[in-house]
Amino acid sequence: MHAVSSNLVKPIVLGSVAGIVAGLFGVGGGVIVVPGLVLWVGITQSKASGTSAATIVASSAAAMVAFGIGGSVDWRAAALIVLGSVVGAWGGAWLAKHLSERVLAVTFALVLLIAGVRMVM
Amino acid sequence: MLEIAGLIALGLFAGGIAAALGIGGGVIFVPALVVLFGFDQHIAQGTSLAVILPTAIVATVAHTRMKNVKWKLAVPIGLAGIVGAVVGARFALALDADLLRRMFGIFLILLAARMGWRAWKLDGRTETEPDTP
C-alpha cells in the first residue's frame, strides 16, 4: 500500500458518508466532517471547521443541483436567506475565535433538540 | 412583507452560528423552514442547500484568511462528497415528504445529543489539541 493512497482512505470514506447525509437531509455535511476530522484524522477543532467549510462548498453544490433538477428549490426564499446569512457568516467566523465553544455547543444543542422533537411529532 | 423580513433574519442568525461551528447551516435552515415557515420537507431541503452554498463560500474565504483550511484533506473529502451528495439527494427525492421529515427529526435529536455530549466533555476549554505520539 502506497503512503499516498492510504492517506486518501480516511478523506474518501469521510467525504462519501458526509455527502450522502448532505444529499439525504439537505445539510452541508459539516456535522459529519468536523467530528470525523477531529476524532478520526486528528486535527484541531478550528482547522476542522475551516476544512469542513471548504468541503461543504463541493457537496452542497452537487446536492443543490440534484434538488434543483427535481424542482425542489424555492429560489426566492433562498435569495432572501442568503442576504442575511452572508453577513451572518462573517460574524460567525469571528465568533468562533472569540466565544467559548462550550457556550456555542450548548445553545445549539438545545435549539436542535426542540426542532427535532417538533419534526418527529 | 413579514415573511421577507423573517427569511432575512433567519439567514442572519443561522449564517452566524453555521460559520462559527464550521457547518453549512442546513440543520437550522431545514427545521426553521418546515416548522416556522410551513415549507414542504423536500423544498425546505433544496432551498437550504441553495443557501448553504454561498454561505459556505464566504465561510471558506474567512477560514482561509485565518489559515484554518487544510486543502490536502478538503479536496479529496469534497470530491468524494460530490458523489455521495448526488446519491443521497436522489434517495431523498424518492421518499415521501412526511417520512423524510420524521427521519430528519430523528437526525436532529441525535445531533443534539452529540452536541450536548461534546459541550459536557469540553469542560470550559475552548480548544483541544490532539495528543502527539
Image (spheres, grey):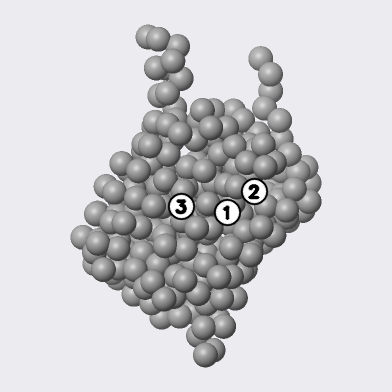
- Residue B102: which numbered mark, if any? none
- For label 1, the residue is B58
Observer-nearest of B97 and A95: A95
- Residue B129 picture quarter: top right
| Whole-percent x, y for residue B32 in the image | 49, 72
B91 in relation to B37, above or below: above
Tell which residue pokes out farthest to the top in this image: A1
Residues at discs 1 and 2 both on one chain: yes
Observer-nearest of B53 and A45: B53
The secondary structure type at the circle numbered 3 is loop
Residues at discs 1 and 3 both on one chain: no
What's the amino acid at mark 3?
Gly
Q: Residues within 10 Å of mark 2 (few under 14, many from 20)?
A: many
The secondary structure type at the circle numbered 1 is helix
- Residue A28: which numbered mark, if any? 3
Residue for point 53% across, 58% down? B55
Chain letter for mark 3 = A
Mark 3 vs mark 2: give the one in front: 2
| Whole-percent x, y for residue B98 in the image | 30, 70
Residue for point 53% across, 32% down? B71
Labelled pair 1, 2 in contact (Cβ < 8 Å): yes
Q: Residues within 10 Å of mark 1 (few under 14, many from 20)?
A: many
Q: Is residue A74 left or right of residue B123?
A: left
Observer-nearest of A82 and A38: A82
Observer-nearest of A42 and B16: B16
What's the amino acid at mark 2?
Ala
